């Protein structure tokens, strides 16, 4: 009898341990397989308030961006995500950091060609390009006309066995010709109430370094002997010939640090309604102005070379800034075909800007694989205490900017996305199945004469 009881106990223990082992072995992974996202976008804008030219002139810019995001399951509970990308832009506005640079301008091969050459010159003069004419309304052809930004980041996240706790950390960088940034951060997420309630905390820090580039007339005047510098030889200064930008000084600090803390609370309210609240605290210190933004004072006489007005100074802003966005999201599931996603955010900062953002998106399911989602977004903000249009600031002011991003304006954005989803990933490329494809278009329009269009394509593959 004792032997039988011992045998039963041994068999029971073996069965329980085997059951536990099976549960552990077959525990669902946070991420079942490697996912690869390929993202591409094209952005184009135009406007008439270039900060590089002190609040007037072309803001024409185009940008091509591509990135790849790879999410890899390390084990059942951990996921590593790598994000790398490159962005190449061409900017008529930034080309006018040195509007007198014609290193890329196309010239006639024979300067002595007569009538045809003269007609070409006249047409170029009217357009404000080539032929030696510097104008805030057209691009110069120097090196600052275009640039490439490269970025990369890595995020590691760990989920608890019950999937109610998620901890993650990240590190990243971005670099372009006048700027380098390193970012580090982490987050903590907790789910309660059978995963119907979620609280998330996040902290992030960025450490940036400028390579200060100034309007060419300012740093040439200061560093190369005033009007005796080679730059001013052989040119005619019209208006006030005694050009003297006495306010201008080289930046002593080229660092900028940004620290942010975010908190969010999400709740499933009913079977068809989900809501969330969030807020961010952002603190910045260091060089917060842009060194190549020009300023023109109301109490200084105007000086010109050709059609380009010489700057009185560059932008000067406080070396600290505090930002506080607070917002909410509310999503309504109407039926299998329609969902409503709504969003509102209030923004405040200690530079005098307050802003409101509201948006509405309506995903519409078309069949089993396609979703169309029209979007509308409205934004309005007050002007910064330090903003004024060209030739409005006084040289005695402590801070000044003519950057229209800091002005008062309203903005409307209209968009549409089309998404194809194949949960069975029937389409294959090598070992990867196509999970979804999303094409999105947005048109952005600001009341201070800035218009932009962006087209984004995202493709997700799973292994």
Image (spheres, rainbow, N blue to C red):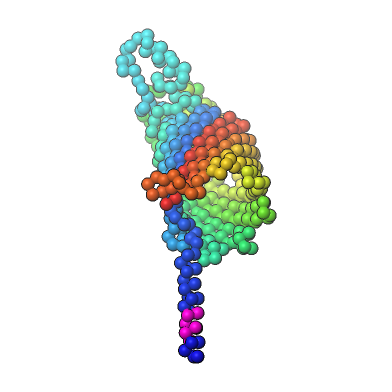
Q: Where does residue 147 sit, x and y in percent of width and height?
A: 41, 37
Q: Nearer the viewer, residue 439 or 364?
A: 364
Give me the residue at 54% from left, 65% from top: 162
Give me the residue at 58% from left, 29% from top: 449
Q: Report the side of 268 relative to 370 (left or right).
A: right
Let me know if residue 317 is in the magenta part: no
Query: Eyeballing the image, is 46 above or below 367?
Result: above
Let me know if residue 7 is in the magenta part: yes
Q: Nearer the viewer, residue 46 or 257?
A: 46
Farthest residue, direction bottom: 2
Q: Where does residue 286 sit, x and y in percent of width and height?
A: 50, 49
Farthest residue, direction right: 270
Give me the residue at 47% from left, 84% from top: 7
Q: Main secondary structure of the magenta part?
A: helix
Query: Eyeballing the image, is 256 above or below 119?
Result: below
Give the number of marks.
0
Give the extent of the magenta segment.
6-12
Residue 182 visible? The answer is no
Query: Eyeballing the image, is 153 above or below 418?
Result: below
Q: Where does residue 415 sit, x and y in percent of width and height?
A: 58, 36
Give me the residue at 50% from left, 36% from top: 455
Residue 331 visible? The answer is yes
Q: Where does residue 178 sit, x and y in percent of width and height?
A: 42, 41
Q: Nearer the viewer, residue 243 or 259?
A: 259
Query: Eyeballing the image, is 175 above or below 450?
Result: below
């Amino acid at each position: 009898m004792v032997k039988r009881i011992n045998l039963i106990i041994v068999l029971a223990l073996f069965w329980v341990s085997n059951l536990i082992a099976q549960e552990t072995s077959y525990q669902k992974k946070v991420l079942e397989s490697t996912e690869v996202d390929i993202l591409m976008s094209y952005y184009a804008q135009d406007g008439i308030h270039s900060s590089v030219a002190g609040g007037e002139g072309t803001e024409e810019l185009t940008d091509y961006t591509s990135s790849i995001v790879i999410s890899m399951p390390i084990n059942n509970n951990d996921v590593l995500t790598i994000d790398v990308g490159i962005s190449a832009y061409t900017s008529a506005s930034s080309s006018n950091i040195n509007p007198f640079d014609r290193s890329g301008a196309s010239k006639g091969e024979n300067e002595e060609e007569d009538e045809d050459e003269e007609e070409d010159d006249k047409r170029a003069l009217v357009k404000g390009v080539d032929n030696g004419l510097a104008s805030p309304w057209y691009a110069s052809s120097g090196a600052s006309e275009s640039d490439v930004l490269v970025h990369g980041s890595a995020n590691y996240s760990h989920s608890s066995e019950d999937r109610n706790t998620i901890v993650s950390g990240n590190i990243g960088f971005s670099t372009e010709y006048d700027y380098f940034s390193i970012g580090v951060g982490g987050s903590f997420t907790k789910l309660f109430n059978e995963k119907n309630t979620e609280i998330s905390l996040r902290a992030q820090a960025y450490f940036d370094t400028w390579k200060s580039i100034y309007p060419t007339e300012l740093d040439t005047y200061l560093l190369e002997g005033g009007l005796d510098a080679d730059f001013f030889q052989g040119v005619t200064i019209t208006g006030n010939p005694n050009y003297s930008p006495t306010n201008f000084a080289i930046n002593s600090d080229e660092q900028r640090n940004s620290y942010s803390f975010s908190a969010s609370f999400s709740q499933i309210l009913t079977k068809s309604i989900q809501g969330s609240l969030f807020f961010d605290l952002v603190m910045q210190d260091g060089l917060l102005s842009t060194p190549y933004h020009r300023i023109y004072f109301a109490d200084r006489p105007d000086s010109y070379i050709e059609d380009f007005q010489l700057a009185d100074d560059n932008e000067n802003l406080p070396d600290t800034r505090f930002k506080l966005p607070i917002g909410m999201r509310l999503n309504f599931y109407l039926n299998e075909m329609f969902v409503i996603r709504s969003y509102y955010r209030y923004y405040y900062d200690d530079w005098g800007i307050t802003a409101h953002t509201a948006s509405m998106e309506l995903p519409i399911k078309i069949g089993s694989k396609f979703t169309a989602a029209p979007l509308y977004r409205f934004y309005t903000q007050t002007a910064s205490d330090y903003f004024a249009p060209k030739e409005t600031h006084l040289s005695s002011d402590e801070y000044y900017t003519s950057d229209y991003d800091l002005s008062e304006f309203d903005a409307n954005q209209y968009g549409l996305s089309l998404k194809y989803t194949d949960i069975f990933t029937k389409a294959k490329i090598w070992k990867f199945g196509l999970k979804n494809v999303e094409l999105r278009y947005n048109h952005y329009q600001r009341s201070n004469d800035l218009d932009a269009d962006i087209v984004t394509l995202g493709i997700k593959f799973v292994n």
